[in-house]
Image (cartoon, rainbow, N blue to C red):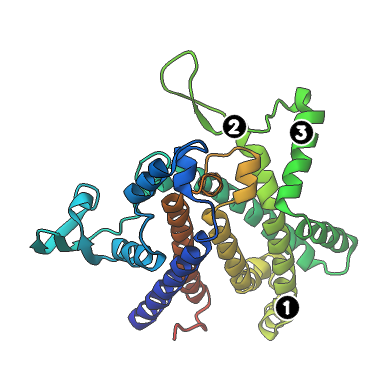
Amino acid sequence: MIRYLLRRLFRGLAILLGVVTLLFLIFGLLADPAQQLAGQRADVATVEGIRAELGLDKPRWQQYLLYLNDLSPLGWVRPAQAGDVTHQPLYTTGAGSLSLKVPWLRRSFQTGEPVLMLFLQRLPGTALLALVSLAVAALLGIGLGVLAGMRPGTWQDRSLSLVAFAGVSAPSFFMAIVFIWLFVVEWGDWTGLASSGYVREPAVFHAGYTWHWQHLLLPVLTLSIRPLAIVFQITRDSLIDTLRQDYIRTARAKGLPSWRIIQDHALRNSLNPVITSLTGWLASLLAGTFFVEYIFHWQGIGKLTIDALMTSDYPLLLGCCLCTATIFVLVNVLTDLLYAWLDPRVRLG
């Protein structure tokens, strides 16, 4: 187990290093943030002063190495960073200190706030949207999959499979527009739903916040369609295959009722591929439901990343992408551990 975790940890670090390297190559093609901050009418001296202040006047390879140093848990902390970076000095000189430190994602060009703080402020919004969407997809997908898998070839099975095929084929951004048109534009007087809004918003007439749970409905409906259809199809196919196994025939020969066979024998062994699919979708949703959040103006990681891209906020954009990749790595490791726990035949090698 320990060797497996260490191997996955080093593999995850290699993936994150690749993400940082690729993003630095891509950022060279984006607009100059110093020009955007200074404005179109700013003179050359003003723009160059902003570039020097942000460290953009250095060669790209030097910016890359400095960023890796900021990310490293063992790195050089410059005097200008000492107030921002949580660190424990090991060796100190006038130019800084070699320290054990918390990885530093720098500050946003636009707001001046720490990137990690901005990311963590938006993470609960995306987590709420992702977990509720996944819960809806899991409950309905597994339930309908069991119903279809117990009666393969019937009209219920064919009807549900047809609807699932349509759900898999529906892009989220397209369905978001369709749902806004239906439930807000056409039926808005009846549904009372809005095309944008967040669950918790500052109160207008009193201190504190007001809660608007109805704002969660359309984004969750949009995001849960595809994972629901996929979970349904996987559950159905896996259950049909499991019900053909010898131990299921033995259980039936003993006279066990069908619901007992499904509950105690067939369903658990059918859930391994379902769990793999759900955790994959969880990683994708937690990483940022970019277009859906932007369309519904949902205050989450996806909208934060798109806003950073539109303003060429390099530290914020790079920090969001790096945290997103970290989520993928961690969820994949947890998926393997959960898979081994569900199926004793699986061994972590």
Q: Do the residues labelled 2 and 1 touch (CB within 8 Å)?
A: no
Depth-wise, is mark 2 or mark 1 nearer the camera? 2
- Work out whether residue 117 can be spotted: no
Q: Which image quarter is the C terminus in? A: bottom left
Mark drawn on residue 3: none
Name the amino acid, label 2. Gly
What residue is pinned by disc 3? 183
How far across and down, in percent of the image, does residue 82 sit?
Answer: 19, 51
Depth-wise, is mark 2 or mark 3 nearer the camera? 2
Q: Residue 93 appears in which quarter of the rendering?
A: bottom left
How far across and down, in percent of the image, does residue 184 sit?
Answer: 75, 30
**Count of numbered badges drawn on the protein:** 3
Q: How crowded is mark 3: few (under 14 residues within 10 Å), some or many (20 or more)?
A: some
Q: Residue at left 87%, top 63%? A: 158
User: Disc 3 on helix, strand or loop?
Assistant: helix
Mark drawn on residue 197: 2
Taking 278 as reference, is 172 above or below it?
above
Residues at marks 2 and 3, CA–CA distance in whole angstroms? 14 Å
Name the amino acid, label 3. Phe
Q: Residue at left 69%, top 67%? A: 235
Task: Work out which residue is located at the far top of the displayed protein and give it.
Answer: 205
User: Disc 2 on helix, strand or loop?
Assistant: loop
Q: Are marks 3 and 1 in contact (CB under 8 Å)?
A: no
How far across and down, in percent of the image, does residue 313 sit?
Answer: 46, 48
How far across and down, in percent of the image, does residue 116 sit?
Answer: 37, 50
Please state which of residues 136 and 270 is positioned toward the viewer in this rendering. 136
Mark drawn on residue 241: 1
N-terminal label among 3 and 1: 3
Taking 240 as reference, is 24 above or below it?
above
